[in-house]
Amino acid sequence: MPTVRLLAMPGSARRDSWNRKLLAVLVRGARAAGAEVTLYEPRDHEMPLYDGDLEAAEGIPPAAARLQALFAEHHGLLLATPEYNGFFPPLVKNTFDWLSRPLPDGSGKPGTVHVRGKPAGIVAASPGALGGIRSLQHTRQYLSNLGFLVVPDQVGVPKADSAFDTEGQLQDARVRTSVEAVGAAVARLAMKIAGG
């Protein structure tokens, strides 16, 4: 089996967010299945709100160009995202909107050329009773529109404010196993694709 590299991204910039904790579980599942994982930290790659006039005047922000390059080097995506009023947060939308803009090399190709056909796994944690599950359908559609192959498995973790222990681990072993399985599914699909 070829070694694959996955990019792991929290959909929240908050340092102590539940979705950062959930992402760690997702990553553990992918690593156990044999993938190498790189953490993408939104705080280290801040981008302005997408603005066509800004893009026309200055091109895409350096952080967006770096993200395009990162996806060129990775075989898939692991994403843990909060739910904001039934949808994924603006941070996720803005990040991927910039990613989709033309590459800075002058080729005219969209940034999505580096994500098309690559697997993605999505999970969500929310203090509500539905665990962010409403946002996952929109996240799935959005990533699919960009060209990702979103694996069928997904997990929403409800009552996230009490779902993790003091070490940041999911307390429910069944939920923990389900989240790890999403990460493993992405790793396995990436390996199949990379193996040709």
Image: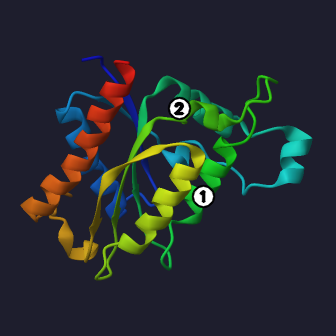
Q: Residue sitting at 89 percent across and 52 percent down?
A: 53
- Direction from residue 46 to residue 38 in the image, left or right: left
Q: Does dot 1 land on a helix, a strand or a loop? A: helix
Is 129 situated above or below 47? below
Q: Residue sitting at 45 percent across and 61 percent down?
A: 14
Q: Position of residue 70 (x, y in %)?
A: 53, 29
Regarding residue 55, the answer to whether it shows in the image is: yes
Foreground residue among 193 and 136: 193
Q: Earlier in the sequence, mark 2 or mark 1?
A: 2
Is 149 situated above or below 158? above
Label 1 Cα crowd, 10 Å radius (few <14 / some 14-19 / many 20+): some
Q: Does dot 2 land on a helix, a strand or a loop? A: helix
Label 2 Cα crowd, 10 Å radius (few <14 / some 14-19 / many 20+): many
Is 72 situated above or below 88? above
The reply to whether dot 2 and dot 1 touch (C-beta < 8 Å) is no
Residue named by callout 1: 93
Foreground residue among 147 and 54: 147
Q: Position of residue 189 (x, y in %)?
A: 32, 34
Amino acid on which disc 1 is placed: Lys
Figure coloring: rainbow
Amino acid on which disc 2 is placed: Phe
Dividing the picture into quadrants, the one containing residue 176 is: bottom left
Residue named by callout 2: 71
Q: Position of residue 118 (x, y in %)?
A: 46, 35
Dividing the picture into quadrants, the one containing residue 134 is: bottom left
